[in-house]
């Protein structure tokens, strides 16, 4: 069975095709692609086969202004006669809301539940729902499945998920859900394939969105993101955790009516805060580091705020679990920025977390260990494999559906 995986973000849509493995083996990648900078003049569509062949083509100018236009372009490409036939589709959905607690086949009832969940993720779920509806319309004869970032965190205890707010809101589904679950699950899977999974582990998924997750025996015990992906550690355009009083202050400072004020602050906290607010630069860690190296004090401060917030989260989870057997870095920054890894770990030396500078700075791909030989805690860099994880779940669900 050939599985199309659609992984949509706020400004890009990644997609890939997998072939089911024989007798339940791991799905094999056939091609992958990405439509980036949606809504921008420089929007770009790339598709590459596993042998490196370019399967894309020139993107018509101005044809990817929205997520719907973007997925239509992608579906046009994957539907071409020379492309592999799509036999199932899996979608990454950030927030399933309170009713959906497992990866599942998409029905109209599931879509209605996702519509209800928009109140929890108004900047993420509407685009995801629109993408799903476009996919279902283009491929009506195949099964479509939703895979949720929150499912991996269902192992967290009530003491980790419960917010101290009035019961009526908790009964409406207000709790800590956690995100980047597919990434965390893929990391546990890779570590298990290499041997035993560390008993007490912290995964720092650092990219445009960032989170730190505490795991005990490969299961989520706590995580920094909460009801939405806006909270937790400092991120590219999101502030992470804030004093609730500051949010109220920001709302009161806005001009216009109540709804306009809420929308303005919501946009600010999701698109104009975090590193971009501190540096005054684009959402690009390389650009921030380049500016800091040239003496830009705003960039230097931003880097300190960012790495300190991650180190605090990892250190806090170390205390919570009574120690750490492993720290894992993943995501675009976590995998590729040696300086960020070193600065975060420098704050954890007192906990016995030591990095080998040569291993940390060495170029590499795939799972690799960068801890010093005398470190009490192993340190790994592990590439996230969200798309493969979605393909694994879709393959499993499709086999059960037969």
Image (cartoon, helix red, strand yellow):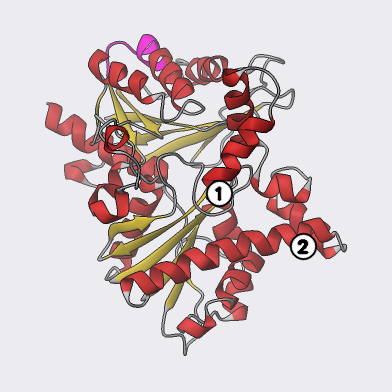
Please give the range of residues in magenta.
Answer: 135-143
Crowding near the residue tagged with mark 1, few <14, some 14–19, many ≥20 C-alpha atoms within 10 Å: few
Along the viewing direction, whichever of 332 and 217 lies nearer the viewer: 217
x%, y% of residue 382? 46, 61
Give residue 117's quadrant in the image: top left
| Residue at the outermost right position | 294
Residue appearing at x 69%, y 32% in the figure: 253
Along the viewing direction, whichever of 359 and 328 lies nearer the viewer: 328
Residue on which disc 1 sits: 242
Q: Does residue 137 show up?
A: yes
Locate the C terminus and report the quarter of the image it occupies: top left
Q: Is residue 40 above or below residue 189?
A: above
Residue appearing at x 44%, y 54% in the figure: 224
Q: Is residue 142 magenta?
A: yes
Q: Is residue 159 above or below residue 105?
A: below
User: Is 168 placed left or right of 246 in the picture?
Assistant: left
Which of the two discs, 1 and 2, labels the residue nearer the N terminus?
A: 1
Residue appearing at x 39%, y 72% in the figure: 318
Residue 300 is marked as 2
| Residue at the outermost bottom position | 374
Residue appearing at x 49%, y 36% in the figure: 32
Residue at mark 1 to residue at mark 2: CA–CA distance: 21 Å
């Amino acid at each position: 069975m050939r599985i199309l995986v659609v992984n949509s973000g706020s400004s890009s849509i990644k997609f890939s095709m997998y072939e089911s493995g024989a007798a339940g083996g791991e799905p094999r990648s056939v091609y992958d692609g990405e439509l980036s900078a949606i809504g921008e003049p420089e929007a770009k569509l790339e598709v590459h086969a596993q042998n490196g062949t370019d399967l894309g083509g020139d993107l018509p100018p101005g044809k990817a202004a929205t997520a719907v236009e973007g997925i239509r372009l992608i579906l046009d490409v994957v539907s071409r006669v020379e492309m592999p036939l799509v036999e199932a589709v899996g979608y990454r959905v950030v927030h399933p809301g309170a009713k959906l607690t497992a990866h599942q086949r998409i029905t109209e009832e599931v879509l209605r539940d996702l519509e209800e969940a928009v109140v929890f993720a108004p900047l993420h779920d509407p685009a995801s729902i629109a993408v799903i509806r476009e996919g279902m319309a283009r491929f009506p004869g195949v099964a479509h499945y939703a895979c949720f970032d929150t499912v991996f965190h269902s192992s967290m205890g009530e003491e980790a998920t419960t917010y101290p707010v009035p019961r009526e809101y908790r009964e409406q589904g207000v709790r800590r859900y956690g995100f980047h679950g597919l990434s965390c699950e893929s990391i546990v899977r890779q570590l298990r394939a290499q041997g035993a999974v560390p008993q007490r582990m912290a995964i720092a998924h650092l990219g445009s969105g960032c989170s730190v997750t505490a795991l005990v025996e490969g299961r989520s015990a706590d995580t920094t993101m909460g009801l939405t992906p806006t909270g937790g550690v400092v991120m590219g355009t999101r502030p992470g955790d804030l004093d609730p009083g500051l949010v109220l202050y920001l709302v009161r400072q806005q001009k216009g009516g109540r709804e306009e004020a809420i929308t303005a602050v919501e946009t600010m906290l999701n698109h104009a805060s975090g590193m971009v607010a501190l540096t005054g630069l684009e959402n690009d860690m390389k650009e921030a580091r380049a500016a800091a190296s040239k003496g830009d004090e705003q960039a230097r401060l931003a880097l300190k705020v960012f790495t300190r917030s991650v180190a605090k989260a990892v250190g806090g989870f170390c205390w919570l679990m009574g120690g750490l057997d492993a720290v894992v870095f993943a995501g675009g920054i976590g995998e590729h920025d040696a300086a960020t890894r070193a600065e975060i770990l420098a704050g954890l030396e007192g906990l016995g977390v030591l990095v080998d500078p040569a291993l940390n700075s060495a170029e590499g791909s795939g799972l690799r260990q960068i801890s010093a030989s005398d470190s009490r805690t192993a340190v790994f860099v592990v590439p996230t494999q969200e798309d493969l994880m979605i393909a694994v779940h879709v393959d499993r669900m499709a086999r059960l559906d037969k």
